[in-house]
Amino acid sequence: MLTKKMFCVANHSFAVDMAGNASLWNYLASYLPFEKGEANETGLQPLFCLNVNETDEISLPEEMNCVVEYDNDVVAIGIYSVVGGTLLIRIAANKYRLDEAGWLIWKQESKDITLWLKSDSSTEHKIFVINNSLMLLYAMFTAGMNTLLMHASVVTCGGEAFMFLGKSGTGKSTHSRLWLEYIGGTNLLNDDNPVVRVLDDGEVRVYGSPWSGKTPCYKNESARLKAVVRLSQAPVNEMERLEGVAAYIAVLPSASGMKWDRKLTEGMHNTLAALARNVAVFQLKCRPDEEAAVLCHRVVTESV
């Protein structure tokens, strides 16, 4: 079994070396559509390489400066700095499983990052940590490359893509399912973490990724992003187009970015601004019904 593999997501390559426990590849089927083969034989230059290891006890420096800690009910992350420019990133499913946390060790300016997993952690939690480590590193290494990892659901229809945003529980996945049911020719591209790229000519494309939440939709495909729709629940279905600052504010909360780092934040904001300039952005206040999907489809196709 190969231990070091190369992957390409939205035309950005990264490598993963699972020498510490190659059997974990069996639980990472979502990456198969993006696999390019043995990392040393592809000829691709990875943005980063994640080296995955296991140990009974993770050894950490005595002095660590807390940069940021957060727990959003999806993942608990702590980022710490140590003398010499090394970042330590703790990743766990939630604050109650910190004893199972994995730790990323990243000497900044280096493309090689080590992930230490607890040997006695469950396989399910190890895979959770690996997935979130890769998402985090992907977002960080592509932040200055007109690329965003978004929290959204995306469908394609007529060869173009439509991206639905909103707070957790708003109904992004539900609205995508309504399109699949009531709008002919609709297909799901990604249901949780698509990748958006602004190309040099101003075209904005959205790509499938290995990260799609609870919906197994891992497509190595892309389409031109025709419209972005921010959803909110309401007793009636109403839709309006947003312009300028309002459009930017609508897309901002759904971008995955390290807002604690000035350079990374600048890259994220520049890409978001280009997205808001080049793609039509809408607000849809809606019920979870057929009428909402039909209204949304009609407005975005007629107005863009």
Image (cartoon, helix red, strand yellow):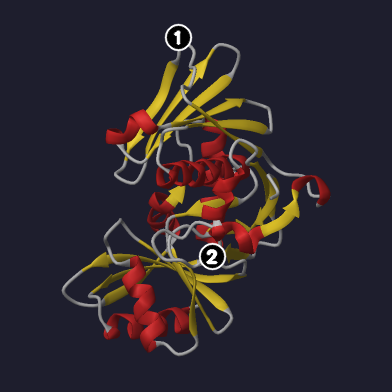
30 is higher (above) or lower (below) than 58: below
Q: Secondary structure at mark 1?
A: loop
Residue 50 falls in image quadrant: top right
Q: In percent of the image, x 73 and y 57: which residue is there?
A: 36
Residue 199 visible, this orientation: no
Residue 138 rendering spot, x and y as whole percentages: 58, 45
Residue 48 falls in image quadrant: top right
How far, Cα to Cα, is label 2 from label 1? Answer: 41 Å
Q: Secondary structure at mark 2?
A: loop
The mark tally for this picture is: 2
Residue that label 2 marks = 218
Q: As drawn, which residue projects farthest toward the left?
A: 235
Q: In percent of the image, x 49 and y 12: which residue is there?
A: 61
Comparing 289 with 33, the one in front is 33
Residue 46 falls in image quadrant: top right
Q: Earlier in the sequence, mark 2 or mark 1?
A: 1
Q: Hey, what amino acid is under mark 2?
A: Tyr
Q: Seen in the image, is 28 located left or right of residue 93?
A: right
How packed is label 2: few (under 14 Cα within 10 Å), some, or many (20 or more)?
A: many
Q: Seen in the image, is 96 located left or right of residue 162?
A: left
Q: Which mark is residue 259?
A: none
128 is higher (above) or lower (below) than 200: above
Residue 302 rendering spot, x and y as whole percentages: 46, 84
Residue 97 visible, this orientation: yes
Q: Are marks 2 and 1 in contact (CB under 8 Å)?
A: no
Q: Seen in the image, is 292 located left or right of residue 4?
A: left
How packed is label 1: few (under 14 Cα within 10 Å), some, or many (20 or more)?
A: few
Q: Seen in the image, is 208 located left or right of residue 256?
A: right
Comparing 289 with 51, the one in front is 51
Residue that label 1 marks = 62
Q: Hey, what amino acid is under mark 1?
A: Glu
118 is higher (above) or lower (below) than 39: above
